[in-house]
Image (cartoon, helix red, strand yellow):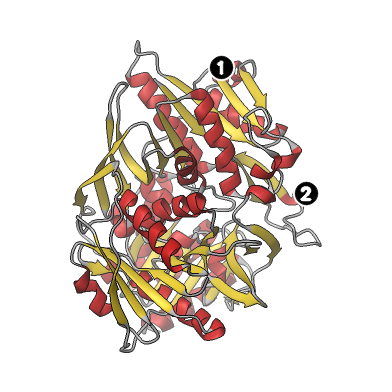
Amino acid sequence: MKILVPVKQIAALDEDFELLEDGSGVDPDYLDYELNEWDDYSYEEALRIMEANEGEDVEVVPVTVGPEEADDALRRCLAKGGERGIRIWDDAIEGSDPSAIARILAKVVEREQPDVVFAGTLSSDHAFAQTGMTIAAELGWPHAAVVNHLELKPGDAKATIHRELEGGLEDRMTIDLPAVLTIQLGINEPRYASLRGIKQAKRKEIEVLSHADLGLADDDVGVQGSLSRLRRMVMPEKGQAELIEGTSAEQAARLTEIIKELKGVA
Amino acid sequence: MSGILVISEHRQGELTPASLECITAARQLKAEKNQPLMVAVLASDSDKYAERLNLEGVDEIVRITTPEDEFQTDTYEAAISALISERGPTVVLVPHSVDAWIYAPVIAARENFGFATDVFGIRYEGDELVATRAAYAEKIHMELDFPGKNTVLLTVRGNTFKPAEGAGSAEVTDFALPDSETHSQHLEYIEPEAGGDVDISQAEFMLSIGRGIDDEDNVEEFQELADTMGFTLGCSRPIADSGWLPKSRQVGQSGKTVSNCDVYIAMGISGSVQHMAGMKHVPNIIAVNKDPEASIFSIARYGVVADLFEIADELRNNFE
């Protein structure tokens, strides 16, 4: 059995940040890169299936679309398990929206022929919640999103899953395999990598491919291959919050007055 | 190509409020471009919902009768794709719901529609449709357009537009469900666990804690603070996911909406959309956070940029 896990190196903003003057994005000086939080859970879920079925030859492969720095995201995964990763990048991919990224990932699925794909429900930077289901659309595979409980063993023809709906309601359902599932926070408790694992991950193989290696044309990726185009990024208007200033003691004193007044006990 | 189409959604026999909000958003576009407004409903007994959708500004209600009342993505995808290709709307609005998270990206990709999710601003610049959505934990807005796309599908953020009201005079039509293979099967709904001792949706005064409290050992301190102040303790998702407080204490989209709350103190909560969905209606929101850019300040009435432990200590002294 093979589980392919698409992951993303996301950008997080520093406390102070600035947009580029042309509005095309955030000034990279103010960005820190890390593995998307949701992908910690999807990768963990794959590792747990691998470990629960020792002797069944379950392989877990992380894959990402991104420049060389995105190797960090793959190595963070490989430090916890798995033997190899795949990264796709070339200049033509720049400007891709999630639909173009998903087209690339679908090609990796065709090449790797996994039994199931676990993606994160969304990414914490752009939060489109789109990539996973679009991979399924490209492949014509069964698909479900926001999965917070999963029962799946090697050789199964169907998985039983729970989808987390609004208000904490869950939808218990079955889904045919192979399938693309997006995994929700809280489905498991992701492990920490061991120092030994981190060291070993540095030597694990990362295969690097271009869109052309996957049989995609130039206009399948980038802005040409996308369903939306970024016009500009802007800073939202500031809220109307009345800021309470001073030392902690002064701030708390004023807050106490406000709370007592609001509670009608002043 | 003409018209605006809204896909309405329902669950456990009730139309979702987000569906009615989409109609309001669509009505604004209709006013700008003078295009007919269609609302589709997919259900085993679509009459039940069709009547409720007959709202001011709706020109046509399209009933699609499905074998099951519950959402099934293959059925939705096939029916909505077929309806769009027959009617050719320029804009399709659907709620940014957990169900739409499945079907909307799939329809957009298969049909090559313009597409954006979690949109809260929709406007025309000339003939060009521009959608606004947020990124980076709400700290930045991104404006998207859709060059060369005849149809644009958008998922609309909840609690952004007011639910549509007012009686309408829509024509009701039927659209035949196309054949499709289904690959998933709904078994049952599982209701969230009951709250045990407290029902936070009824609480008038809430103190909620988030990631900023750092460690499980600190939960007790905030429980004491809440007790001292006469507040009910709630939390954001990471606290419930870590098991530091029961799920029944979680405020937000996948937790509870604090519908009865008058004063809400958010401590160490940065303010994800999902959390704010459960509390942004509260009239008196007080946010305490060390990050001055935290999005919670955008909806707060009072803001305190400070170390939340220092504030908590001082507050406890003041209320004791």
Which chain contains the residue that carries disc 1? A
Could you say which quadrant of the image residue A227 lies in?
A: bottom right
In depth, the one of B117 and A223 nearer the eye is A223
Q: Report x, y in % for residue B21.
A: 40, 75
Is residue B248 depicted above or below B86 in this figure? above
Q: Report x, y in % for residue A248.
A: 58, 65
Q: Which mark is residue A29?
A: 2
User: In this image, A235 relative to B32: left or right?
Assistant: right
The answer to whether any part of residue A243 appears in the image is no
Marks 2 and 1: CB-CB under 8 Å?
A: no
Q: Report x, y in % for residue A196.
A: 56, 17
The local secondary structure at tag 1 comes to helix
Residue at horizontal 39 percent and vertical 58 percent from the top: B82
Q: Residue farthest to the front? A: B86
The answer to whether any part of residue B218 appears in the image is yes
Residue at horizontal 66 percent and vertical 41 percent from the top: A33
Residue annotated with mark 1? A196
Is residue B141 depicted above or below B24 in this figure? above
* Image quadrant in which the N terminus of chain A is located: top left
Could you say which quadrant of the image residue B242 lies in?
A: top left
Residue at horizontal 49 percent and vertical 45 percent from the top: A134
Q: Report x, y in % for residue B62.
A: 32, 71
In depth, the one of B283 and B96 nearer the eye is B96
Q: What amino acid is labelled 1 in the image? A: Arg
Q: What amino acid is labelled 2 in the image? A: Asp
Q: Identify the mark nearer the N-term, 2 or 1.
A: 2
In depth, the one of A124 and B242 nearer the eye is A124
